[in-house]
Image: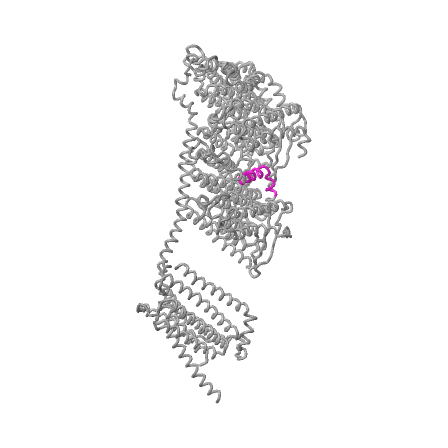
Amino acid sequence: MGAIFRDPVLFATVLGANLPFFTMAVILIFTRHNPRLSSQLSVGSIAVSAVCAISLLAKLFFAPALQYQTLWFVSGKLNIVFGYYLDPLSLLMLTIVGIIACLVQIYSLGYMAGDPGYSRYYAFQSLFAWAMMNMVIAGSMLQLFIFWEMVGLASYFLIGFYYEKWSASQAGKKAFVMNRVGDVGFFLGLILLLLGFGNLGIPELNHAASTHGLSQGLLTASALLIFCGVIGKSAQFPLLTWLPDAMEGPTPVSALLHSATMVAAGVYMFSRIFPFFSGSHDAMQFALVIGTVTMLLSSSMAMVTYDLKQVWAYSTVSQLGYMVMALASGGYFAGVFHLTTHAGFKALLFLCSGIFIHEFHTNDMRIIGKQGGRKLKIPMVCITVGALALAGVFPFSGFFSKEAILSVLAAQPNKIWFAAGLFGAVLTAYYSFRLIFHILLPMGGIEEKHHHDDHGGSSHEHEEEHHGYIFWAMAIPVMILAGVSLVLGFAEHPLEHFIMRSVNVPGELAAHGGAALQTVAHVAAEGAGHAHESGSPMLLILGVSAGLLGIFVAWLEYGRKGASRKGFLSHVPAIWKLFDLRWFMDVFYRKGLDTFMYAGLTSLFTLNDRRIIDGGIDGICIFTEGSGRLFSFLQSGMLQFNLLLMVLCAGAAVLYFVI
Amino acid sequence: MTAMNMAGFPILTTILMTTIVGLLVIIFIPPEKTKLIKQVSLASASLGLVLCLWLYHAYDFQKGGLQFVERVLWVKSIGIYWFNGVDGINLPMMLLTSVVLFTGVWTMWELEHRVKEFFALMFLLVAGVYGVFMSMDLFWIFVWYDVSLFPMYPLIAIWGGTRKEYGAMKLTLYLLAGSAFILPAILFLWAKGGGHTFDLFMLQKIGFTPYVQNVAFLMLYLGFGILAAVWPFHTWSPVGHVAAPTAVSMIHAGVLMKLGAYGVLRIGMTLCPQGAVYWSHLMALLGTIGIIYGAIAGLGQTDLKYVIGYSSVSHMGIVGLGLATLSVNGINGAVFQMFAHGIMTALFFSSVGFIYDRTHTKIIPELGGLSKTMPVASSFFIFAALAGIGVPLMASFWAELLVLTAAVKAFPVAGILACMGMILSALFMLRVVQRTFYGEKNPRWEHIPDVSKFLAVPRVILMSCILFFGLFPKVMLDVIQSTVIPFVTRF
Amino acid sequence: MNSLSTYLIISALLFSLGLLGILQRRNLIGMLISVELLLNAANLNFMAYNRFLAPDPVVGQVITLFVMGLAAAEAAIGLSIILALYRKMHSINIEAAQKMKG
Amino acid sequence: METSGLNTILQFAFWVTVALTVAGAAIAVFPRNILYNVLGLALALTGIAGFYLFLGSLFVALMQLLIYVGAICIAIVFAIMLSRPLHISAPPRPPVKMWLSILASAVFFVGVVSVALKTKWQCAAGHVYKASQWSVENIGNALLTRYELVFEVISLVLLVAIIGAVITAGYSRRISS
């Protein structure tokens, strides 16, 4: 224990990662009935965590990867360790999580104000922050899995935050169960590794994979199984439908968990053991296919929905698909970089949408547009910034990361992935600007009769008047994120250097971790190198034009004067319906669950229990009882008759034996 | 037997005596003085708890083996010993028993109907349970085992709920049917061992022939398996639990079901290692079926206690699967799961019991939206449900991890199927949670008060137990494996 | 005359008479009387075996005494049951007591 | 000669005892008046006490008289007085039951007698008949040493039986009143 206080780095890590847990406990046990204090505690502790994360990043920026570990328990030959692993990737992610969680919690001060479950909300936010931070800096895959599950638990509680709403609790359940499906694969993969390799330490795994310490079969099998976890958590095909449903939660939750950090955990885990995955060509190809399919499917869904949050949810899924594509095609840095920028601008988009939703009490972009959404200037500007970043327009952060991904994809021998990536970029730009134009340039202008006018004055005054504190609590985080989205892209090279740097630092970890990282560097450099060789100007032009093309199409349909505002897909109702119903995936799951599980197995088993097993037992009982009844006729109650029989029998027996 | 350490002070007998003295004192208190009866019960239960905690603390796991041994020859001609001792397998069970008894007594604080008889019978039941766990003599194990079965009938039939006579009768008949397998098996082993000792460890040294081991193990497995709700002998579990009053469900599901698994481990696998190897596939098969079947059948239930009953079937399947692997991790996990499930299911039943006391219904569709009116009581149930799902950092997660790891190694197909059980258990627990606690506020329950601070204490104790052993599994695993590691060398 | 079989036959005769009484009497007290006969027949056997066969002279006598004690106890209990029964049913006819009929 | 004379007397006395006993037993069983039955029983029991004398045990014979004839018969008489009035005549005996009972008893009698006669009885090793060993002192000695437990158990049983009898008889009175 003393070591924690002696080592400032360890102290900051432990404090930053675990403070929210105690906050949660304190809120749940003591300050439930004092929402104000609860929120202050929670925001305070997450601020401390964020500061810890930033200072760790600053302090360890040039330091080698650090590993702390202690034995958790031993069972047989299994040594389960608990530890923290601080390398550039985890530090980066820790900082992202800390900052965004902090911003979102500040934002929630406004958004959730007056909610009856205010304290509960902050308790679960703290639970999430704790789990997510611990997951990020976990030293072993098992520990990662544990906090991965805890993150899912926090997500379950936060999605179902409005538990009076059936759809919300249903969505929470769906999220948890679908995640569980993926997690079981993950779990099995871990068990396989545990049995085949015996050690789940992240550096050890990476090292073993890159030095062929693992047999190819084991590696592929476990990589594929572990990838199931990514599919679940990062909502990849075929488990992607929980994420749009998860939008039932409060908007800040969607921003934090279901776009910026938690769902990115899958991608993070992928990059965490990237050398391990890259040891298996088959697994990588599988991931590439899954990522591409996900990206395209969810983009298509985003094109038809009118729900603000749903658009961003589908978009999140598709961007996660992008990241998986990048990683699966060897673009370690591209994936991580897109993860970083995406966290920023997608949180931004959600938080802006949250302001609209909070203001207009609807999720429908058409109604928001009509009621004067564009009059909310700060969120309108910020959401446009976010959309530009998402669409990959220079100089916003999304541009840089998307270019990085496209260059990696272009380096793939099969150009189909690159084409899919480009197509995805077009779709992304299209659906995000479809939304922007809906709000900015609503059909038939702004209806002047919306309820805000009753108070008189513009909506801006209204904001000042009514909820100054609330509005600014929401606006400031949004503006900070917008600023970040604006500048983060320019930090590409320092970041790349930082993420890739640890390769060149000979530290104590070089012994077992160095080689792993070299592989990363090698693979990544290869990818980047290819990209650059294969003509970056060409790539640049293609990437930018894809984004612009999407925006242009959106403008044609929704933005320009006299536009139909229906979308080209509305001409083909079948496809519209297909996209709108999520390619019938939900229908399929629902039907499957209902017919196979509930109507099939469950009722069969229940029937079996009641009729066959219990029936059999009861049958035995009835037989016993019946035969007892039968023989009870002998029990005439006439004592002497019984005696007589007894004596006669005894006498007869004696006679038989004697004579 | 070199590792056997004689105890100076007969701590185990003292623990047993806390219940028996409690029972006697209660018998001599006039029935009107319910408050005094409850206080005496709680005092004797807490004395047991303190002694068990001390025992747990004092057990030297580095040395391992049987400790705190008391061994006195009782009947010379057939070799019955008063032979008690603890090792890493029964120590967690003793702790579990004391915790569940303590919280169970506290949970029943509001009982009004025939208080005296209730607590007297409950202490008799627990005396039997303690006896089985601490005894190392086959004769005494069987005697205590039956002592623990007998009070179940009146406890359920008098204080029970839904279809109590049927439930009580079914449960008792099932369990006695189990006894009918166990007694011949014990006598068979005793006779084959020369007929001059019931001492478990003396019999162990004899080394039975494979045939004897196969037969005896199967009988013991079936007999004890009924109590452990091994599929297809599980149907008493939902029915019996539905009928039983809260504390009885807690003790029964929490502790008594563990007697079954413990019996298989303690008698079956100790005396018949070859038999265990021979039947391990059967055990793995039934365990896996139990895991899947319990979860799926639980999906369709509408009675809260039925759901928990089926979840117990599923969780005890994990124990069965763990034992079947005959490996360090599997048995570690199985014993740990026995402990974790005991605590968890006690929490389940105590929260359901509270809800039932207040609302007088356990039917899920009638309950909906309970979270609004009783947030604390609901959170206890939800916590238990999460533990049941196997959320990490709760005790049962580690148990499942260990068992599944061992199972995937020993029986890959069964292991993978059992993993699928994790999905099902999540689905079915969350479904119950959703339907019972979430949704619109139900006007019918609007004026029902939430759980009071006083009655929250036992539930909080159980919750903290789950969390403590989830965060620090070492505390338990060190103890368990000190015995399990030498144990598995004989397979 | 003084031989084992004489005594055995006498006791068998007494026993059979007692048996007959038990089987056909409906008066409970009559049945009790017959039971006394049965016990005495058995006692006589014990004594006779002891006298003619056993090595230890005391054992048969002790058993006889024991049986006598038991018989006294049995008579006390039996008679009190009869009295209780009579108060309950106002009859001591065995055929009236049929509550245990299955 | 003297002994043969004594023998004759003894033999005569023996057969008289047999006759009395069997007659007593018959009276105890056959008459329908319950009081006659008790008297018959007393006669039969006295006869059996006589057999004990013939067998050489004075103590047991005395006990027989004391306990059976003295105590039990009197108790039965009391019971008769406390229960049904004697003058109420009982319903007639059903003949089927009667004959069946006689058949059963006869079968039993024949069976037992044939066993008794067919068996070749052999003395146990060490069987010596010495009158001194049948003395009261000897029995008293044995009862308080080797058969101490038997002695105590009898007294305990009697105690319990008496308490039980009191409760059974008294309890029913409480219920019926």
Chief SS of the magenta region: helix
Give yes or no for residue B469 being in the magenta stretch.
Answer: yes
Q: Is residue B269 above or below residue A371?
A: below
The scheme the figure's colours follow is one colour
Query: x, y (%) of residue A237?
Result: 48, 27
Q: Note whether residue B173 is visible.
A: yes
Q: Is residue B396 above or below residue A138?
A: below
Looking at the picture, how far across and down is residue A416, in whole percent?
49, 21
The reply, left or right, for residue A386 in relation to residue D103 is right
What span is in magenta?
B458-478
Look at the image and say whether residue A51 sits in the magenta stretch. Answer: no
- Evaluate whether residue A282 shows in this view: no
Looking at the image, which residue sits at the far top?
A561
Choose between A207 and B177: the one closer to the eye: B177
In the image, is residue B458 above or below residue B203?
Answer: above
- Farthest residue, direction front: D177
Seen from the viewer's position, the closer of residues A233 and C16 is C16
Question: Total marks drawn?
Answer: 0
The residue lying toward the viewer, choosing from D65 and B325, is D65
Task: Tell me where residue A458 appears, x and y as whole percent.
Answer: 48, 12
Q: Quadrant of residue A362?
A: top left
Q: Residue furthest right?
A: A6
Judged left or right of residue A466, residue A496 is right
Q: Position of residue B289 (x, y in %)?
A: 47, 42
Please identify the residue farthest to the bottom as the structure is shown.
D1
